[in-house]
């Protein structure tokens, strides 16, 4: 049942200290391990040594032991959010996220190109549909052409 609650509400956690970390990670839109990395760097001034990272994250995930420096960092993030000063797009919080970008290179050029392609496709479709339809005298079905209407008005077609 705990897994279902966590899937429905990612901030839900049985352990209150881990829930505090999860809420801070959700505010920054990063994973909990990245939050632990940021907290370690903030507290100790250096990155987590590779030989310690598995142990720290393992005790955090399996034994619910949240380091004091991680709780301190999470409370700092919550404080910034409460004060309205948290910018989750700041590159400081995404230093361990190599795919993160807050600016798309040549964004205006890409947007104009995509808009031109969409306008060309839609406009071309409308133009082609206009070319392929016959002149009709009605808006709604059945579609009779003007020639068919003239023939109907002239009377029945004589049978030979």
Image (cartoon, rainbow, N blue to C red):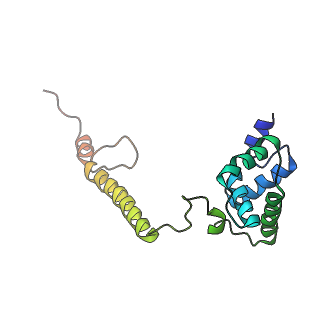
Q: Position of residue 99 (x, y in %)?
A: 54, 58
Name the quadrant containing residue 144: top left
Q: Position of residue 127 (x, y in %)?
A: 30, 56
Q: Residue at x 66, y 64 (%)?
A: 93
Q: Residue at x 77, y 71 (%)?
A: 84
Camera sees residue 134: no
Q: Nearer the viewer, residue 131 or 7?
A: 7
Vertically, is 67 above or below 143?
A: below
Vertically, is 160 above or below 32?
A: above
Question: Which residue ends up furthest to the right in the rendered image?
Answer: 16
Q: Is residue 102 left or right of residue 123?
A: right
Q: Nearer the viewer, residue 44 or 35?
A: 44
Question: Which residue ends up furthest to the front in the rendered image?
Answer: 51
Q: Residue at x 81, y 72 (%)?
A: 83
Q: Position of residue 98 (x, y in %)?
A: 55, 59
Vertically, is 40 above or below 19?
A: below
Q: Quadrant of the C terminus?
A: top left
Vertically, is 32 above or below 157?
A: below
Q: How many marks?
A: 0
Q: Is residue 18 left or right of residue 95?
A: right
Q: Position of residue 113 (x, y in %)?
A: 38, 65
Camera sees residue 66: yes
């Amino acid at each position: 049942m705990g897994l279902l609650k966590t899937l429905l509400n990612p901030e839900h956690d049985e352990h209150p200290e881990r829930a505090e970390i999860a809420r801070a990670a959700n505010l920054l839109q990063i994973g909990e391990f990245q939050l632990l990395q940021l907290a370690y760097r903030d507290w100790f001034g250096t990155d987590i040594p590779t030989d310690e990272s598995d142990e720290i994250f393992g005790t955090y995930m399996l034994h619910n032991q949240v380091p004091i420096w991680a709780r301190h960092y999470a409370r700092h993030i919550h404080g910034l959010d409460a004060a309205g000063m948290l910018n989750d797009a700041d590159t400081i919080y995404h230093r361990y996220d190599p795919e993160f970008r807050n600016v798309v290179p040549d964004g205006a050029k890409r947007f104009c190109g995509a808009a031109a392609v969409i306008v060309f496709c839609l406009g071309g479709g409308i133009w082609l549909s206009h070319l392929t339809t016959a002149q009709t005298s009605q808006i709604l079905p059945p579609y009779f052409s003007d020639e068919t209407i003239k023939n109907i008005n002239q009377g029945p077609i004589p049978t030979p």
